[in-house]
Image: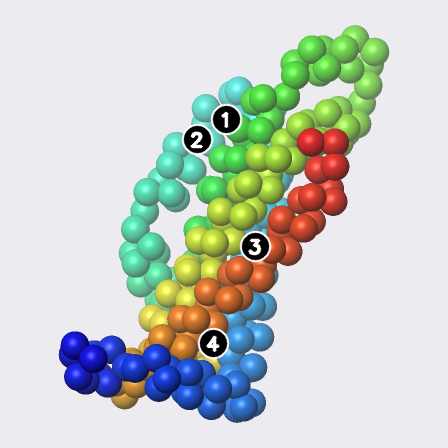
Amino acid sequence: MVTGSQFILPAPEKVVVDFINMLVTGSFYISISVTVLRGIAGFVIAFILALLLGILAGISPVFRTWFTPFLVIIRSTPVISVILLALIWFHTDTVPVFIAILTMFPILCNNIMDGISTVDQGLVEMANTYKVSNYRVIKEVYLPGTLPFLFSGVSSAMGFGWRAVIIGEVLAQPLHGIGTGMQLAQTYLMVSKVISWTVVAVLISMVFEKLIRRVESRVVVWN
């Protein structure tokens, strides 16, 4: 009402109409599916790497001393710099996944390392005294102790990861994706569609947050 312009801030009813129109198009669901798959792929790769390196860094002080500077570098590097390099190195469909991995990996890794540092060392010493295998110590002592930190890291990583994927899509412009839809809408000054895509992105993030909390409530029963 204040601006009087649909190109600056459209009326709510205009956004609702455009949102409903988007729901009835087939490309809308393809874009959502592709973005979700990119986010999940980036998370799975980042999670596996963080689990392996985070546990190793948490257990070995020497490796942690060597590894921490790399985490600081990854965490401190501006996202836009990484995206610009990724646009040179990778195919446009791969750029959002790569950005998601670099965004989520340090968050997950730091939480796993912090979780391991809080594990009761008395339990570890007892396991060593009774010559329990390293595999069982990791599985039955370290992993249960790090679960609360792990789920906290997963929640934070997924929140940042979705944003990273969409930013990557906006700049890389793959054939399908929420970021691609946002960029096309912005190019043609369709502000209501930009807002509609934003609402979709927020809803997806909320759904995954709920899923993570539900899994956490089932897995971390003892907590």
Are the residues at dot 2 and dot 1 in contact (C-beta closer than 8 Å)?
A: yes
Q: Which mark is residue 202?
A: none
Question: What percent of the width, then of the height, locates residue 135?
Answer: 77, 29
Q: Residues within 10 Å of mark 3 (few under 14, many from 20)?
A: some
Marks 1 and 3, how far apart at CA:
30 Å
Identify which residue is drawn at 41% across, 37% down. 70
Q: Disc 2 marks which residue? A: 68
Q: Which label's residue is closer to the chain start, 1 or 3?
A: 1
Looking at the rendered image, the quarter that the C terminus falls into is top right
Are the residues at dot 1 and dot 3 in contact (C-beta closer than 8 Å)?
A: no
Whether residue 213 sits left or right of residue 135 in the image: it is left
Question: What percent of the width, then of the height, locates residue 164?
Answer: 41, 59
Query: Which residue lies most toward the front here?
Result: 1
Q: Which label's residue is closer to the chain start, 3 or 2?
A: 2
Q: Nearer the viewer, residue 88 or 48?
A: 48
Q: Amino acid at mark 2?
A: Thr
Q: Residues within 10 Å of mark 2 (few under 14, many from 20)?
A: some
